[in-house]
């Protein structure tokens, strides 16, 4: 009995010491598993989006509670529930970016707020400015009222108040508004992101696959594509590092490409020998106008107007400052998301090195006794 008590006492003191250590040295502990307690209770706005599923997955994996406001049907959010321990991911329906009371209630029990709201075009009910500026203001105000420990606002590389594109201007004004209300906010500016559900490689991949020619848009524009999970990792790290408050981070991948180089790479890996054409300016503008009329446009006129490079500027705080030291190359992580666009070939048409690779993989999966 005594021993048992003693053991219990020892165990408790250890836990207490650990808690005190965590409290003193880190606000949150992100070294545990999904059933541990990281101390993070995060409200993630824009939870149904592309980046959010990677952020929420990383939060759930270290034992955090996540409040996920969303609009629409529950089927848009159900995939997030298994990302954390049982009951730790809490979807809250009825999200309206104009509803101050709803936003207050969503953040009132949290110590972290992450704003991933973003729109690429105006919809019938919401203009770009409402999503990027007005909603960001309301969320920052609510976060300030509860005095959350960490506030992360995701903007975009190329956000500029003087840009000809309304999208870039609204992104920049959103940042300014947030910093005015919550000066300790961490601003994350990612370059174009790619991954399984992206808008970037999937559009260009489908163009390589289905269009008669590859139409190059802004061929000399430089981009530094970044894998979406690297951005998510950087966001989670920013919650625990002490010096990220009030800082702006520009996140880009390991390599800078021109849009022409991206096109060449896509042609090669998707095995389509399409001609790359640069349309005359007027024709290009008309094409973008037609494409942006689609219900879910692959490219919008506001995106087209933004001709600035999406490259991390010199002297800016980078991915490595958020302890993401080995960003994934696009050649490796970008490929699986567009694999379905690849031209199928017969075994005889394969290059000798591809044949050898295929044979090696077959051996690996089927063993030496290959029945086929
Ligand atoms: N994707 C990129 O390449 C890229 C590059 C640089 C920066 N960013 C920025 O990174 C952030 C996340 O990007 P993402 O690609 O994950 O965006 P996303 O997939 O388009 O998701 C945007 C999220 O915002 C929500 N949202 C938009 N308008 C709303 C409205 N009026 N009311 C309520 N919710 C609304 C969407 O909800 P619904 O699902 O209900 O519409 C969705 O959850 C954004 O701020 C974006 O601007 C993205």
Image (cartoon, grey):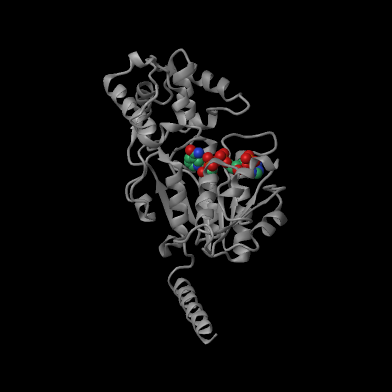
Figure label count? 0
Asked where in the image residue 352 lies, by quadrant, the reply is top left
Q: Is residue 73 above or below residue 108?
A: above
> Quarter holding the N terminus?
bottom right
Report if residue 171 is visible in the image. no
- Residue 307 position, x and y percent, is 43, 32
Q: Determine the residue positioned at 44% across, 27% down.
A: 339
Asked where in the image residue 268 lies, by quadrant, the reply is top left
Q: Determine the residue positioned at 39% across, 21% down.
A: 372
Q: Is residue 278 above or below residue 165?
A: above
In-front residue for pair 97/70: 70
Side of 143 relative to 30 (left or right): right
Residue at the outermost bottom position: 2
In-front residue for pair 67/81: 81
In-front residue for pair 314/193: 193
Q: Is residue 144 above or below residue 23?
A: above
Report if residue 101 is visible in the image. yes
Side of 163 relative to 121 (left or right): left
- Residue 333 position, x and y percent, is 40, 37
- Residue 341 position, x and y percent, is 46, 23
- Residue 315 position, x and y percent, is 32, 51
Ligand 1 visible in quadrant: top right
Q: Is residue 26 above or below residue 237?
A: below
């Amino acid at each position: 009995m005594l021993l048992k008590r003693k053991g219990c006492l020892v165990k408790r003191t250890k836990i207490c010491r650990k808690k005190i250590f965590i409290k003193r040295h880190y606000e949150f502990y992100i070294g545990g598993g999904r059933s541990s307690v990281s101390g993070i209770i995060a409200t993630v706005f824009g939870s149904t989006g592309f980046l959010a599923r990677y952020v929420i997955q990383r939060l759930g994996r270290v034992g955090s509670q996540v409040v996920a406001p969303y609009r629409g049907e529950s089927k848009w959010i159900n995939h997030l529930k298994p990302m954390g321990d049982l009951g730790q991911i809490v979807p809250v329906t009825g999200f309206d970016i104009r509803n101050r009371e709803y936003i207050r209630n969503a953040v009132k029990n949290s110590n972290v707020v992450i704003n991933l709201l973003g729109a690429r075009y105006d919809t019938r009910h919401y203009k770009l400015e409402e999503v990027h500026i007005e909603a960001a203001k309301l969320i920052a105000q609510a976060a300030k009222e509860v005095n959350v420990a960490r506030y992360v606002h995701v903007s975009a590389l190329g956000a500029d108040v003087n840009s000809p594109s309304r999208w870039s201007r609204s992104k920049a004004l959103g940042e300014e508004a947030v910093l005015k209300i919550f000066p300790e906010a961490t601003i994350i500016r990612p370059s174009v992101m790619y991954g399984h559900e992206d808008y970037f490689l999937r559009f260009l991949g489908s163009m390589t696959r289905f269009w008669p020619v590859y139409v190059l848009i802004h061929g000399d524009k430089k981009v530094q594509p970044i894998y979406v999970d690297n951005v998510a990792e950087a966001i989670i790290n920013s919650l625990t590092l002490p010096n990220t408050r009030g800082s702006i981070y520009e996140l880009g991948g390991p390599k800078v490409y021109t849009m022409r180089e991206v096109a060449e790479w896509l042609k090669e890996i998707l095995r389509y020998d399409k001609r790359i054409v640069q349309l005359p300016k007027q024709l290009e503008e008309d094409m973008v106008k037609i494409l942006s009329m689609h219900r879910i446009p692959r490219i919008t006129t506001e995106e087209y107007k933004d001709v600035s490079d999406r490259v991390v500027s010199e002297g800016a705080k980078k991915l490595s400052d958020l302890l993401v030291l080995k960003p994934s190359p696009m050649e490796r992580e970008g490929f699986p998301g567009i694999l379905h666009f690849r031209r199928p070939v017969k075994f005889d048409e394969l290059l000798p090195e591809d044949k050898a690779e295929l044979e090696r993989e077959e051996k690996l999966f089927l063993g030496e006794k290959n029945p086929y």
